[in-house]
């Protein structure tokens, strides 16, 4: 029997804060898999609050996730764009910028794009 697992993001295995306190990523890992809950505060923008940590011109993460609350706009490097809101499934390939829309925090769950997300670039 593998057993049931019940975990809380309030006791995450790892927390990665964004620049200027504009949110954070909380990571839970279990049995070789993981999921991240990211809280993007109003005014958050990838190019201002994660780019300094990533050291890349645009986000290189490949996100597969779900929007719990709030709204976010994503613009790909080629100019394609869309908005995500509560209840939306999101698939965002590498090469994008994103920012929170409105005055409510955007909370997402991400199953694929968290491995190096918001980790400071090496040396």
Image (spheres, rainbow, N blue to C red):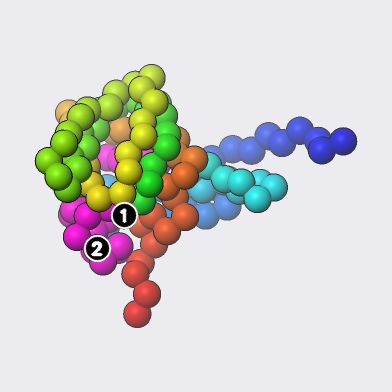
Q: What is the secondary structure assignment of the residue under circle 2? A: loop
Can you identify the residue that label 1 sits on?
60
Cα–Cα gap, marks 2 and 1: 8 Å
Q: Is residue 107 visible?
A: no
Determine the image quadrant of residue 73: top left
Can you identify the residue that label 2 sits on?
56
State the image coordinates of residue 87 (x, y, percent, origin top left): 38, 19
Q: Which residue ends up furthest to the top in the rendered image? A: 87
Marks 2 and 1 in Cβ contact (< 8 Å): yes
Q: Which residue ends up furthest to the left in the rendered image? A: 79
Image point (57%, 52%), residue name:
13
Q: Is residue 12 above or below residue 67?
A: below
Image point (38%, 46%), residue name:
62
Range shown magenta = 37-60
Label for residue 91? Answer: none
Q: Is residue 89 visible?
A: yes
Image point (36%, 34%), residue name:
91
Q: What is the secondary structure assignment of the residue under circle 1? A: loop
Seen from the viewer's position, the closer of residues 98 and 78 is: 78
Q: Which residue ends up furthest to the front in the rendered image? A: 78
């Amino acid at each position: 029997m593998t057993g049931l697992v019940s975990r809380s993001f309030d006791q995450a295995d790892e927390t990665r804060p964004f620049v200027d306190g504009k949110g954070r990523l909380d990571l839970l890992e279990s049995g070789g898999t993981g999921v991240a809950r990211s809280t993007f505060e109003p005014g958050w923008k990838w190019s201002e609050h994660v780019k300094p940590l990533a050291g890349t011109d645009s986000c290189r993460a490949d996100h597969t996730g779900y929007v719990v609350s709030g709204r976010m706009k994503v613009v790909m490097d080629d100019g394609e764009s869309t908005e995500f809101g509560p209840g939306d499934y999101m698939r965002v390939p590498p090469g994008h910028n994103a920012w929170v829309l409105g005055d409510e925090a955007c909370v997402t769950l991400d199953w694929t794009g968290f491995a190096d997300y918001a980790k400071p670039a090496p040396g």
